[in-house]
């Protein structure tokens, strides 16, 4: 496989190293001269000095072949978005992945059609939420391409769903309860399953349905 | 008619003043509060301090019901992203984006974005000025 990695910081250089060790062909692009020099010691001719949002730099890196994979992993969200747009829309690169540095910019990537994104901050936040009791909805997994997400939520004693059967809940369209974890054991959420305070419930839903689901299960 | 100018530097502020004089209701957005001074002491339009990538700032500036938006910060990629977001999310009928790099300006213009490239304008004007002021060169 041929991959272009735009951005030679910690993320980019480590990904490039891994891809190379797996036997793939890689060009790493870095625009800061001092960082480029450091990278050159290790990556030699496989690292290129330049701004990866400039078409001629991408062309020198072989964007027109096109590569199977382009990664926009610089420290600048606008740059990452533009790199991925140019690669996928201009050069028909089949797979592009963007790094989102500021989670508030995630909505822009979604809106502009860059569906494969990675945001370290959001991932860390997700883990923190998981550790905080009395949490609301915790995101476990986002399947952007499939337009689905899996979340976990806890039924507390004030929940309007406590004591009710799953079949008796007026769940919003596009949401479904999958499993109930009780006393450390999980079982599939059947129509006849009765929810109790303290239950951890796994639900699968379409993105954007959270608030509706929250209303049914938390009344807020 | 309502206009929002994002990026109130030399270019943005001049566009804001120019169209305000035509009678547009103009709001300028800039990260730096000092940019307000560029609009002149008699500025009666709006001014919002913040980054154009911030959806809250865009709403505060009135982008959702603007008739036109000019994006002219000092970053090409920032302008391209903000321009597309404004067009797609808020369906503003006229979005004009400044892009200094001619290659990127062309690339996005081909995709339907209204890009203005001052660099390309300068290239054309400089060449034309030389041609106009000198006898025609014989084609070899």
Image (tube, coloured by chain):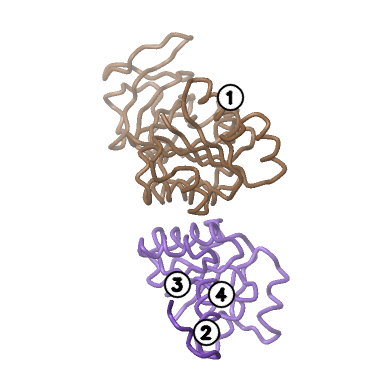
| Residue drawn at point x = 56 percent, y = 34 percent | A46
| Residue drawn at point x = 66 percent, y = 63 percent | B31
| Chain designation of label 2 | B
Left or right: where B27 falls relative to B88:
right
Percent x, y for residue A39?
66, 34
Left or right: where A25 falls relative to A50:
left
Mark 2 secondary-structure assignment = helix
Q: Are marks 2 and 3 in contact (CB under 8 Å)?
A: no
Q: Earlier in the sequence, mark 4 or mark 2?
A: 2
The Cα atoms of the two marked residues, 1 and 4, are separated by 44 Å
Percent x, y for residue A194?
34, 17
Q: Is residue B50 above or below residue A18?
A: below
Q: Do the residues labelled 3 and 4 touch (CB within 8 Å)?
A: no
Reading the image, the residue beneath label 4 is B27
The crowd level at tag 1 (other Cα within 10 Å; few <14, some 14-19, many 20+) is few
The crowd level at tag 4 (other Cα within 10 Å; few <14, some 14-19, many 20+) is many
Reading the image, the residue beneath label 2 is B19
In the image, A22 versus A82, the foreground residue is A22
Q: Is residue A195 above or below residue A29?
A: above
Q: Colour of chain A?
A: brown
| Residue drawn at point x = 62 percent, y = 83 percent | B44
Q: Earlier in the sequence, mark 2 or mark 3?
A: 2
Reading the image, the residue beneath label 3 is B66
The Cα atoms of the two marked residues, 4 and 2, are separated by 11 Å
In the image, B12 versus A159, the foreground residue is B12
Q: Determine which of the numbered discs, if any, sits on residue A178 in the image.
A: none
């Amino acid at each position: 496989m041929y991959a272009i990695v735009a951005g030679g910081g910690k993320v980019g250089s480590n990904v490039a190293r891994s891809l190379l060790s797996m036997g793939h062909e890689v060009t790493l692009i870095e625009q800061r001269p001092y960082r480029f020099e450091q990278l050159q010691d290790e990556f030699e001719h496989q690292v290129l000095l330049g701004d990866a949002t400039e078409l001629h730099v991408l062309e020198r890196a072989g964007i027109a072949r096109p590569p199977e994979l382009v990664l926009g992993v610089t420290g600048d969200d606008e740059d990452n978005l533009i790199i991925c747009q140019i690669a996928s829309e201009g050069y028909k690169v089949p797979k592009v992945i963007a790094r989102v540095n500021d989670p508030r910019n995630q909505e822009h990537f979604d809106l502009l059609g860059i569906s494969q994104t990675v945001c370290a901050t959001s991932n860390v936040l997700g883990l923190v939420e998981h550790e905080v009791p009395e949490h609301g909805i915790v995101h476990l997994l986002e399947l952007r391409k499939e337009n689905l997400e899996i979340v976990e939520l806890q039924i507390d004693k004030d929940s309007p769903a406590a004591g009710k059967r799953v079949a008796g809940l007026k769940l919003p369209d596009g949401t479904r309860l999958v499993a109930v974890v009780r006393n450390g054991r999980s079982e599939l959420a059947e129509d006849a399953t009765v929810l109790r305070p303290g239950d951890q419930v796994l639900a699968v839903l379409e993105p954007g349905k959270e608030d509706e689901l929250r209303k049914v299960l938390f009344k807020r | 008619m309502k206009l929002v100018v994002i990026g109130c530097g030399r270019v943005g502020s001049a566009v804001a003043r120019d169209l305000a004089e035509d009678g547009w209701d103009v709001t300028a957005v800039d990260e730096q509060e000092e940019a307000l001074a560029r609009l002149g002491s008699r500025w009666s339009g709006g001014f919002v301090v913040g980054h154009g990538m911030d959806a809250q700032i865009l709403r505060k500036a009135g982008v959702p019901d603007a008739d036109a938006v000019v994006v002219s910060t000092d970053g090409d990629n920032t302008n391209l992203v903000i321009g597309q977001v404004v067009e797609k999310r808020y369906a503003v009928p006229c979005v004009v984006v400044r892009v200094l790099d001619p290659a990127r300006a062309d690339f996005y213009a081909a995709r339907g974005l209204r890009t203005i490239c001052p660099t390309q304008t300068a290239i054309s004007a400089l060449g034309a000025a030389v041609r106009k002021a000198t006898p025609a060169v014989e084609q070899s």
